[in-house]
Image (cartoon, helix red, strand yellow):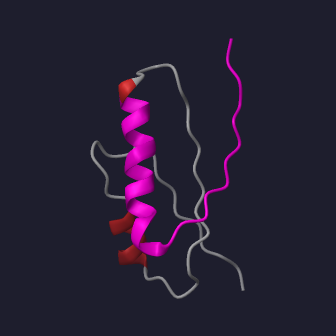
Amino acid sequence: MKIKIFTVAEVVVELEKAWLQHLRDFDIAHPGCCHFEVMIDGPPDRSMAEMIEMLRIDPSLTFTQILERKS
């Protein structure tokens, strides 16, 4: 049996990558038991390079999609 847990995490920008790594570490520690979908609503002035760098965690995410916010 599985359940869904909905989490909204509000963290300072400096900790966003650490939070993603924490989530990925949990996923790796429990292979095949979890499925995560994460959406990040970051600062609107963030560059594409900054978004890609934030997503560089180890091991890397299996799928990443970057959506542009409409003004």
Please tell me which residue is depicted at 37% across the width and 49% down the height of the picture.
21
14 relative position to 66: left or right: left
Please tell me which residue is depicted at 31% across the width and 52% down the height of the picture.
57
Give, as a single range, the part of the protein colored magenta: 1-28
Please tell me which residue is depicted at 35% across the width and 76% down the height of the picture.
49
Please tell me which residue is depicted at 36% across the width and 26% down the height of the picture.
29
Compared to 48, does 4 lie above or below?
above
6 relative position to 12: left or right: right
Magenta region includes residue 3: yes
Q: Is residue 62 visible?
A: no
Magenta region includes residue 55: no
Q: Is residue 68 visible?
A: yes
Compared to 2, does 54 lie above or below?
below
Q: Quadrant of the N terminus?
A: top right
Q: Position of residue 55 (x, y in %)?
A: 39, 59
Q: Position of residue 18 (x, y in %)?
A: 38, 57
Q: Position of residue 11 (x, y in %)?
A: 54, 66
Q: Nearer the viewer, residue 41 or 22?
A: 22
Q: Position of residue 59 (x, y in %)?
A: 28, 42
Compared to 33, does 67 lie above or below?
below
63 relative position to 49: left or right: right
3 relative position to 25: left or right: right
